[in-house]
Image (cartoon, grey):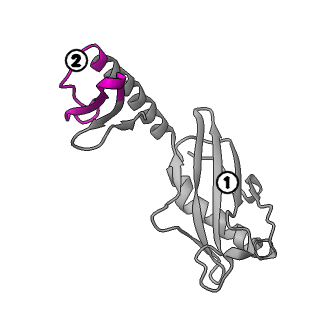
Amino acid sequence: MPGEFHEHDVSFGPFKTEHHTRTVDARFRTAFIAFVRDRILPLVEGSFTRVEGKLYSNYDDPKYFGPLSVVRFRYFFELAFHSPDGMEAARGHLDYNSGAATFSEVPRQPPHVYSLSLQRRRKYVGEKIIEIAKRYREGERDMVCPICGSLISVLYLEKRDFIEGIHCQTKGCIAERFN
């Protein structure tokens, strides 16, 4: 069961422009906390005891505030959820609707949670990739994906004696490039 998440866990800004300084008011902060509670916290797996975070804008300059600007109210957040099991991270871009005081995900760039299970899976896949590379160098071919059982494709550059990539041919469970 996750811990509690509060406004004081997040640093808002600092901002260089009056636009963002005015926009990031109590309604904004309340809307951000609600977004995190509704959309991010359900993806956090550990029972966190501490949260650290920041929210800022990569578009904190008047040149981004034109009448047709799609980034005028775009913000970026980073959160770290600390638990006895490890640290989980969430980050992403969000668009703020100042009229409705709501946040929405940026199309094709949804926020991402680097959960405990995702960390375990990445560690496992990383270990398997090293194992596959080692077996390939020892002469083994026709290896299968340790996740789905499909054939593994190894791109080997003979002139350089270099493995450039290892890929699951069917499902893309493993897709690693080393160049």
Decide which of 101, 153 is in the foreground and name it: 153
Which numbered disc, 1 or 2, marks the residue closer to the eye? 2
Identify the residue position indicated by label 1 in the image.
5
User: Image quadrant for the C terminus?
Assistant: top left
**Quarter where residue 171 is shown:** top left
Q: Secondary structure at mark 1?
A: loop
Can you give x and y, in whole percent of width and height, for residue 113 in the image? 52, 49
Identify the residue position indicated by label 2 in the image.
140
Residue drawn 81% across the image and 75% down it: 18
Whether 161 is among the magenta residues is: yes
With respect to residue 27, does 136 lie above or below? above
Can you give x and y, in whole percent of width and height, for residue 149 in the image? 21, 33
**Quarter where residue 5 is shown:** bottom right
Q: Which residues are magenta?
A: 136-163
Task: Determine which of the numbered discs, if any, sits on residue 160 in the image.
Answer: none
Decide which of 113, 143 is in the foreground and name it: 143
With respect to residue 113, does 132 lie above or below? above
Count neighbours of disc 2 (C-alpha within 10 A) and say few if under 14, some if 14 to 19, many if 20 or more. Answer: few
Residue drawn 55% across the image and 56% down it: 40
Marks 1,2: beta carbons within 8 A: no
Amino acid type, label 1:
Phe
With respect to residue 160, does 85 lie above or below? below
With respect to residue 171, does 12 lie above or below? below
Decide which of 106, 25 is in the foreground and name it: 106
User: Image quadrant for the N terminus?
Assistant: top right
Residue drawn 42% across the image and 29% down it: 126
Amino acid type, label 2:
Glu
Instruction: From the viewer's perspective, tell me whether residue 123 is left or right of residue 74.
Output: left
Whether 24 is among the magenta residues is: no
Can you give x and y, in whole percent of width and height, for residue 72 in the image? 65, 75
Can you give x and y, in whole percent of width and height, for residue 102 in the image? 61, 74
Instruction: From the viewer's perspective, tell me whether residue 125 is left or right of residue 39.
Output: left
